[in-house]
Each structure stands twice: as C-alpha cells, then as structure tokens.
Amino acid sequence: MGKKPRTAITPTREENFPEWYQQVIKAADMAENSPVRGCMIIKPYGFALWENMQGVFDGMIKEHGVQNAYFPLLIPLEFISREAEHVEGFAKECAVVTHHRLEQGADGKLQPAEAAKLEEPYVIRPTSETIIGDSMARWIQSYRDLPLKLNQWCNVMRWEMRTRMFLRTSEFLWQEGHNAFETAEEAREDSLKMLEAYRHFAEDYLALPVITGEKTEDERFPGAVATYTIEALMQDGKALQAGTSHDLGQNFSKSIGIKFQGRDGAEQLAHTTSWGISTRMIGGMIMVHGDDDGMIMPPKVAPHQVVILPMVMDDNEEQVMTYAQKAADALKEKGIRVLLDSREMRTSDKMWDAIKKGISVRVEIGGREAENGEVTSVRRDLGRESKSTEGLDAFLNRVELTLDQMQADMLQAAKAKRDDAIKDVSSLAELEAMFKDGHPGFVRIDAVVRNDSDYERVMKEYSLTPRCLPFDDAGKVLIAKAY
Amino acid sequence: MGKKPRTAITPTREENFPEWYQQVIKAADMAENSPVRGCMIIKPYGFALWENMQGVFDGMIKEHGVQNAYFPLLIPLEFISREAEHVEGFAKECAVVTHHRLEQGADGKLQPAEAAKLEEPYVIRPTSETIIGDSMARWIQSYRDLPLKLNQWCNVMRWEMRTRMFLRTSEFLWQEGHNAFETAEEAREDSLKMLEAYRHFAEDYLALPVITGEKTEDERFPGAVATYTIEALMQDGKALQAGTSHDLGQNFSKSIGIKFQGRDGAEQLAHTTSWGISTRMIGGMIMVHGDDDGMIMPPKVAPHQVVILPMVMDDNEEQVMTYAQKAADALKEKGIRVLLDSREMRTSDKMWDAIKKGISVRVEIGGREAENGEVTSVRRDLGRESKSTEGLDAFLNRVELTLDQMQADMLQAAKAKRDDAIKDVSSLAELEAMFKDGHPGFVRIDAVVRNDSDYERVMKEYSLTPRCLPFDDAGKVLIAKAY
C-alpha cells in the first residue's frame, strides 16, 4: 500500500467527521468555545465571513421593501405566554433575568442582590415574534399601514444542553424578519418569497445547494400555520436546516392583538410571517465545502478572495515586496478583497495557513515572477493541479472570471454530491437496509413507507427525521439524519 | 405683539427643552419607549440613521487595522469581579441571569424553574473588557501577536433608573473596541488616536462640534489609567459626553493575565485600551441640530438625503409621477439616498413629515415643474428662504455640492453656537452668578476657582460636573451641567 498523503486537517472527514469539523474551524481560526456555557466566540476571520453574508442578504431584503429596526433584548414573561404553542416551544430553553444588581455576599463573593429582585422577571429573547408583534399592534391601525415589513440583525439565546460551534450554540447571531399583511394570501406568498430569497442566497452566494419544501406538522415553528424550509446536505450524509420562513396566519395577531380597520371599515386581524437565518449557515458551508486540508470559501462571500504570498530571498526582498504590493494594489483597485500576507513567517507556513482558511485564490510571487512581471496562482478548490503562471496583466484581466468560475464550480460540485445522495425507496425494509449501512443522505419516501406499521420504530432507531415535503416532489416526504 | 408663528413641534425648545426633545423623536418617528423597563425601540427611520453611522465609522476603524469579532453576551460573575474598580463601577447596574428554564407555577403563571437555577449566575454585558480580555490572554503569546485590535458592534445593558430615549437607556447599541499593545506609549498613543477618530466622525460626519480632553480622576472609566472624551454642547447649554477612549494601562492585563513574551524573552503584561460610541450620539445630534420644526439630518448620514414630493392634480397625475420618478432615478444613479414619497396623503402632510424628519433637501414637483423640466428645492436647515426653482439638469449638477454645503453649514452653525456658549471665569463668585441666571453652557475654570473652599458647594448646587481637561487649554478644567 502507498503512503497515505498528509492532510492539513487531522482527522480526515472519512476518519471522524464531527472532529474534522471542529478542527477545520480551529485551523481556519474562525471561532472557538468560550468560557460561557454553550456560547462561542466568533473570531475575526469567521466574523468577516458573517459580515459579508450580512451585507449581501441585507441588500436583498431591502430590495424587497423590508426595513431594519431594533427591539429590546428582554421580553416580559407575560409576552412569551401569549401564544400557547409558542410558550410550549420556547419555555424550556429560556435564559431568565431575575435581578438588576449585584452585591457582595457574606463570603465576599458577588451575588444577585436580594433587594434588587425583579417583580416580573424577563427572558432573553429566544426569538421576537411576541415583542415585535406588540409594536405592530400599536403601529398598525388601518389597511393603509400594511404591508409592514421589519427585520432585525441581532443576538438571541436558547439554552442548549449539547452545543457545537456555529451549528447549535446557546447564543447565536441571526436576522429575524417579521412581516404583516392584510390578507392570508399575501402572507402565504410573502413567506414563500422570503424562502426563495434564502434559496437564492444559499445557492448563488454561499454555493450551498438546498431543497425547498414545507415542514411536516410536527416540525413546524411553535405557533405557525406553515413552516417552509431550505434543507442542505452535509458531506457526512446528514441534513442541515439552513433557514426557515413561517406563515403565522392570524395566530400571533389574535393572541397579541394586531388589528386593523379593513377596506370595508370593519376591524380585522393581520396575517403575519416571520423568517430567519443565522450563523448556523456558516456551519453548513464548512460541512459542504471543506476538504481534508480545511475550509474552502465561496469567492462571493470570502473574507479574502485572493491572498498574495511574497516568497523572498535575502537578495531580492525589496524587489519582490514592491512587486507584490503593486499586484495587491491592482487587485484592490478592481474591488477584489485581497490580503498581502507580509507576516514574518516561513512561506510554507503562510501557504498552509491560506489553504486551511480556504482563501479562494492563492498567488505566489517570488524572484522569478517579480523579474518577469508574472504571477503564479492556484485555485483553492482545484489545488496544485490548477497552478499556473502568467503575466500580471493577463491574471488581472481574468481574475473576476476565475472567481466567478470557482463560485459556479463549487455550487456544481456540491450539487453533484448532494444529488448522488438523494435516494428513493419503495418500502420500509429498503429504507432500513439503507441506513443499516451508514449515512446515505436524503431519502424520499411516499405514503406506502409512511403508513407501514413499523415506520416510527425505524425512524427512531436510525435517528431519522422528516426534513420537509419537497416542493419539487409532490406526495413525497424527504427524510434524513439531521444536525 | 405679533402672532406667534406656528411650529411643527410643541413645546418649542425655549418653552420646555426636555419635552421638545421627546416630541422631536416622536414626530420624526425615530424611536419609542418599549414595554420593557428602561428599554427603547429604535424604529426604522432612527435605525437607518444608526446604520449609516455604523457604515462610516466601521470603515474608519478598519482602515486603522481594527478587526471585528463577536464575544458572548453573558459574562460570568467571576470575570466581572477581577478588576476591583471595574466591579465597583458596574455591579450596581447589572442585569443578572439566574435560571435557564421557565415552568408553570401553582397559579398557572410562568416562573423561573427552580430546578434550572444556575450554579453560577451570569450578568448581561455592561461592557466587555473582562470577557474580551480573557480571550486576549489566550490569543496573545508573544510580542509578535501585538498589536491586537478588536471591535464588536453589539447591545449592552446597564440597569438605569431614570431613562431617556437614546441618551440613557438600560439596553443600548454601541461599538466597543479593545486593543492590546506591547508598550505603555503605544497604548497611550492609540487611545488618543481613537479619540481623534471619534472627533473626526462627530465633526465631519455628524456635524457635531466637540471638545477633546481628558477626564478628571473622579470621572475616569472604572479601571482606567486615563479616560479621554469628546464633549458636545446641546442647545439648552448642557454638555453631552459623546464618546470615550480609555488607556487601561496594565490594570486589566494584570487582573486578567494578558501576558506575552517580550523581545528580550522575558514575560510582560500587555498595555490595553478600550473605546466606545453608542446610539447616545443620536440624542446628541437631535439636541444640537433640531429646531422647533423637528429634526435636521446632516446629509452625510441622513437616511434620506433628498425627498421628492409629487404635487399632483386630477389632470396631471401621470405626467407628474413619471417626471418625479425620472428625477428620483437620476438622483439614485448619482448615489444620492432619495425617497420618492408617493404615499396617498395630502401634500402638505407629506411636506411637514419631511420637515419633522429633517430630510436634508426637499424637492417639490408639480405640474409646472413637470412641464418645464424644472425642480423646486428647499434646504431643510435654511427653510423656505432657500427655496429655488431651476432646470432638472442644473439641480442634478449641483446636488452633491448642495449637500456638502449643507453639511459644512450645519457644523459651522453648531460651532458658532457652541463657541458663543464657552465662557471663562476667574472667580467662584463669577461662576455662581453665571449659573444663577440659567444654563450658560461650557465654562473654563482654572486652579484659583477649583481651590476656592466653596467650590464643591457651588458645583453641587448647580449640578455642575467637570467635563474634561481640554487639550487646547492647558491648566483649565471645562465644567458644565451635563446629560
């Protein structure tokens, strides 16, 4: 047997996928666990990715007529209680604020001051339907005030017992949109429109192929009439819910009192929607795009689209650095996010750092390149096979094309893998056999399978969950193991 | 006596400044009080202003080499306790999280679940020196890891008993920068550099003239070696601290353990700084720029720089709307933030709405303008006096100039008012006489006044506080009533 090639990440995906995931995050310096239970620290490189994602999606929702605003972090208990299913869904994981002052205890340690106990405790928002709905109830008087489309980018908190960076943390960052409409039809249409925005964002910016569909009744958002979802498939065959859009019907407007005078003069209840995506999507990007050498960033949202590595010798440092700076300036001029890595480190360490961080295109500039006015470049997703040397101008002329091509290729590659991992079964026995052997991915099942008396046992035994009723496959349910 | 001219805001600044302030916010639809004690809701128009402010300042700090990141909302009590002065300064106003689940009590109402009481409570961050310092202690190993410059845009919470929208709320939005350096000199220089960034931002983007200086010892940030401040003067003669930058010396690095191996191989403590500005600045902009008709937005950060009001008759609606849209498109094309106000409302109501919101330039387009290819425009700060009609092309050609001129004029006007309200006194008696008569503004005092045995009494009696030791007036202390 030949020697196993060395990989930058240990273990490999094949050896231990969950551990590989943690190691990719660490190697790319994107995030780390914090001393606060279940909460993560998003490090500068990971946060730069989130900022780029925010920038793109924020522009998309503003085009859709959504206005950003900001609502309080704390929610009165009474608000959370208003919608029966909603409280049922979130009460078990709420961080509760009970005091507003600290004092020194007898042991000299800080403790909540008894005299500063709140009469009515607050929870840290797990989501803001109730408190934003309370404002909507005041702001909406007449059909002329509709539609009202609001969004906030903020932190939310859901106390989680088992956490994984980006995928499931007690505190996470997200956008939560809350729209209100005159008619049921408009609300339904809007929730589907926002789902389409998520699909467009996931596929065309994050290179994340997704299946769109409706959640089954059991998997709906607490209080929703319908929940729509985008579901992505990770390289280990598990699904990830990457974004949801809810048609809340009149459930929240009834319990909160979002009423308006209709065109006929009669009082009516508004129809509302809510929709959210979070830092969880970053976890999905890692598990779809990463390889055994680390992260691969889709160029459209990559913190750095191009990294320049100057490779200097004692006798050419000035020449190489000047030329590298010239190349960096030219790229910046074109609006490319470029990093000139001039740290005092060994070039091979810088190279591996760029690979692990998944910087889309790596440019190497040494004495030969400086002398000949050339650059040597490598696409991260293709690796050394794609290495080529050409004149600086030629490189500059095609760099946008290169990045666009890489973006398209990443989506294409992920789609091919995903499509390979979608199976259909016609009996429960077939389904069971499939999962006995490992993690095949998404499986589409029909009523015959669902109506099998042993269905619940098999689903439970293999930790399978219905992901959605896919729009493209009427009558089917898409199931998978899931994050 | 002549009839008092009608103003859009009642009361006027002269009649009741604090109430005028609240009414301006309401009339401009920027924010409102929330059902959560001491917390405000930032409405879309107010939030759009904050987003523009963020956009500008975020660009400035990135140019300075600062990287954005995100740290947990919750801080362990033990962290807060680490720096003695720091805990003293913040313990009295901390929101404390003690439980992680709700349950239904005997009375059927939700309450914190006793079984889910946290062993160690958390506080919601009032500021993040301690938790960011804890990361820095892990991230910084060697002098090569320095400087490290981090920032986060986030929400913080300080339980306030008496709150006023934007100026003092229990939850507020801000940026908090945290930098670490090798030497004391670098930290001092950096804290002054960030102060200069605040001055530049306040004066050149918000048109807010500020005085820069150092806080007196009593007014320092808890745990700082030196606190630098920008102080603005409101139209009622009270001062507002609009941003602070702290040289923390080695105080935090000592208590948290931010150590590194120096160039000489020996272990050393890092020198840190922190610096922040918040939504409070919006309160300052209102109180400096607003007039008795409402808000006036400095063009560089105005949510809408130009509003177009179509004034249609029954027989020219299509013509006017088409022409108004053409003008809006042309402005958008130039990168101007333009609002075409096509709501179904009386034009005079729209006009007053634009005035109260302080939209920099108002464009009126009626049948005559549409016919002649003209526009009629008014600068919000100059009012009807500045009304002029000209060809669309001429208007488009000078619109950027108009906005720049308005920006410069607003700063100039505010500066003139502020400078008029800076006084010098040479005795305590003179100082007392001055404040007996009202709110003169800033007063510069020297050692003679400060050393008067009656100094403390006068300061207290007139609610005066030292604002800073102004850089431009060595040996003087600047005092004022303050927000």
Image: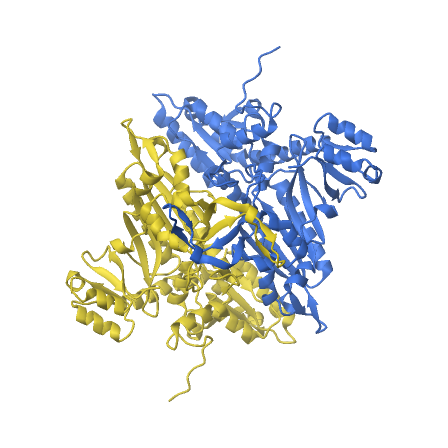
Chain colours: A yellow, B blue
The image shows residue A471 at horizontal and vertical percentages of: 24, 54
The image shows residue B469 at horizontal and vertical percentages of: 75, 44
Is residue B47 visible in the rendered structure shown here?
yes
Q: Quadrant of residue B300?
A: top right
Q: Quadrant of residue B6?
A: top right
Residue at 40% x, 47% y: name it.
B110
The image shows residue B195 at horizontal and vertical percentages of: 67, 48
On screen, residue B256 above or below A100: below
On screen, residue B344 above or below B91: above
Q: Quadrant of residue B109?
A: top left
Task: Quarter of the image for the N terminus of chain A: give it.
Answer: bottom left
Foreground of the two, B4 or B215: B215
Residue situated furthest bottom in the rendering: A1
Task: Quarter of the image for the C terminus of chain A: give it.
Answer: bottom left
Residue situated furthest top in the rendering: B1
* Count of numbered labels shown in the rendering: 0
